[in-house]
Amino acid sequence: MSDTISIRLCGAEDAAALSLIGGATFLETFADSIDGPDIIAHCQGPHGVAAYAGYLADPESRCWLAEISETGSPIGYQLLTVPDLPVDIVPGDIELKRIYIFSNYHGGGLARRLMETAIEEARAMGRKRLLLGVYAENPRAIAFYTKMGFEMAGERWFTVGTRDFYDKVMARAL
């Protein structure tokens, strides 16, 4: 594993890389709990190239890509968007829609770097609160978000195929 990981702002040309990371990490995380056809459809829909191209074209969204510096190989990203969560949204809110990292890079500080980049960018955009949804049965992620200053703000159900998943909605002031 490389010790040198760079993080850079994404452009339109990064949609395919984001789709690859999004689909692969989602598959890696949920392959044992979601039926094959459903997870494939999800990886091709919400994690498809067109979905990421849409986010990258939206002037209210920002996305940052983590890469191995020596090779340029993508290993993670974070995506800020207009909030789409079932909580009271107020002016100045922004959602951390995704923070995905290949599991080989967990525990090395990359998630913290991506989160700090998201917080810095949200502040630069004039935002006042950062929201996110997290799978309620992911204690490692919840502990990380809590450590980063997030608190419970609500809940939602997330459907993939025929399966419903319970998410916690968390928020932190900026």
Image (cartoon, grey):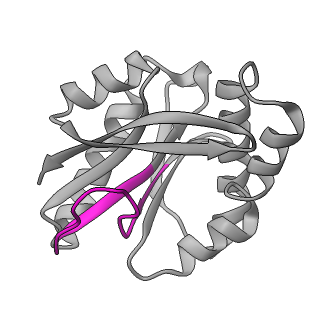
Q: Quadrant of the N terminus?
A: top right
Q: Is residue 110 left or right of residue 32?
A: left
**What x and y, as percent, mark residue 164?**
60, 37
- Residue 15's quadrant in the figure? bottom right
Q: Could you tell me which residue is drawn at 75 percent across and 29 percent down?
A: 34
Q: Is residue 40 left or right of residue 51?
A: right
Q: Nearer the viewer, residue 142 or 59?
A: 142
Q: Is residue 81 magenta?
A: yes
Range covered by the magenta-colored residues: 78-97
Q: Quadrant of the C terminus?
A: bottom left
Instruction: Indicate whether 119 appears above or below 84.
Output: above
Q: Could you tell me which residue is drawn at 82 percent across and 30 percent down?
A: 35
- Residue 84's quadrant in the figure? bottom left
**What x and y, as percent, mark residue 139?**
39, 17
Q: Nearer the viewer, residue 106 or 49?
A: 49
Instruction: Indicate whether 33 appears above or below 112.
Output: above
Instruction: Indicate whether 68 appears above or below 72.
Output: above
Q: Is residue 128 left or right of residue 163?
A: left
Q: Nearer the viewer, residue 73 or 93?
A: 93
**What x and y, as percent, mark residue 49?**
74, 64
Q: Could you tell me which residue is drawn at 48 percent across and 43 percent down?
A: 157
Count how many numbered circles sit on residues in the image: 0
Q: Is residue 106 left or right of residue 74?
A: left
Q: Could you tell me which residue is drawn at 15 percent across and 35 percent down?
A: 149
Q: Is residue 76 magenta?
A: no
**What x and y, as percent, mark residue 6?**
47, 44
